[in-house]
Image (spheres, helix red, strand yellow):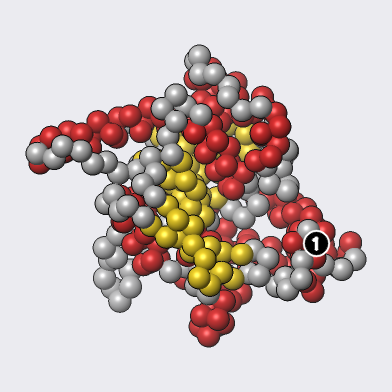
Amino acid sequence: MSLPYLRFSSLEWATLRFNTPMTLTKDEITGLQGINENVSPQEVENIYLPLTRLFQLQMIATRKLYEASNTFFGKKNGSAPFIIGMAGSVSVGKSTAARLIQALLRKWPSRPKVEIIPTDGFLYPKAVLEKRGILKRKGFPESYDQKRLIDCLRQLKSGTARVDVPIYSHVYYDIVPGEYQRIEQPDIVIVEGLNVLQTPAPDHHLLPSAYVSDFFDISLYLDADEQDLYHWYVKRFKKLQQTSFQQPGAYFRRYADLSERESEEIAAGLWRTINQVNLEKNIAPTKYRADVILKKRADHSVDEILLRKI
């Protein structure tokens, strides 16, 4: 199958940095990483720095389109944030990638205001999922309040002065009542989640009026071999046993004191019955809807980059 992408090795991609300066220190990079990753400064310089250069150029071009539209309608000012969509499996490293991209973009000369919106905040509350009998399908498309997420993105693109985003707690495995992430007129928004590139199935034979991805100016998919994703998931599960599972009131407190063998069996079962199914049926099929695909090796480093042809 011929795909509409330009293909780059990590070394070829690194040359696209040109003279863009490296602005993050080793300590800053370490502080941005998740519990299961070890991203080197060299990787940030070779992969993420050229990527943010691409995003910066795309943002400039997009703003010119807004200016042309404002001129046509006789408006003097007004702009919308540049929205980056980021998709990929559980344990692939989306959150770390989002934080690295945010930190690099914030240090561009224009000092843009960059916010991250994790779509976990748009999961239905646990009580709703339990009532609908889909608690074990958390992370599947039907577990998200798509209407609320789309409304949030519509407000952002409309230039709403303040948008409140619900907050999700991985410790309590639920939406935090009454707490919100306040977004106030950002220049760039990174929307990160499992299924953000999916086009939902028609409801009652009617096509939805909008998809989440309709609001993206550019999209990114983090890819890896399924076997590597499985190993990363099990490794992360074991680390969570020693951290968030230990916290008072943690939803997964019952897993905190499992033996090595028991933890591997539980993690393997959760992967096989939930995350692998979601990956194969919902997440992976959206990969080629992305504008940029980062393919990772077994050690989490990026091996190959695919960039959609213009």
Q: Residue at x 68, y 46 (%)?
A: 34
Is 218 left or right of 303, judged from the image as shown? Answer: left
Q: Quadrant of residue 224?
A: top right
Q: Which of 111 and 284 is in front in this view?
A: 111
Helix, strand or loop status at disc 1: helix
Q: Is residue 93 at least partly visible in the picture?
A: yes
Q: Which residue is drawn at 59% across and 71% down?
A: 174
Is 54 left or right of 102, judged from the image as shown? Answer: left
Q: How many labels does the image show?
A: 1
Q: Nearer the viewer, residue 10 or 127?
A: 127
Is 215 left or right of 226, judged from the image as shown? Answer: left
Task: Find residue 126 and report its horizontal and vertical position in percent.
Answer: 57, 76
Q: Is residue 1 at least partly visible in the picture?
A: no
Q: Quadrant of the C terminus?
A: top left
Outermost residue, bottom side: 131
Task: Find residue 268 and report its horizontal and vertical position in percent.
Answer: 75, 63
Q: In which quarter of the image is the N terminus?
A: top left
Three-letter amino acid code at the position of disc 1: Gln
Task: Find residue 307 and report its horizontal and vertical position in percent.
Answer: 45, 32
* Residue position marked by numbered label 1 in the rendering: 241
Does 41 appear above or below 268? above
Q: Nearer the viewer, residue 51 or 266?
A: 51
Q: Which residue is drawn at 74% across and 54% down?
A: 236
Q: Which residue is drawn at 41% across and 41% down?
A: 188
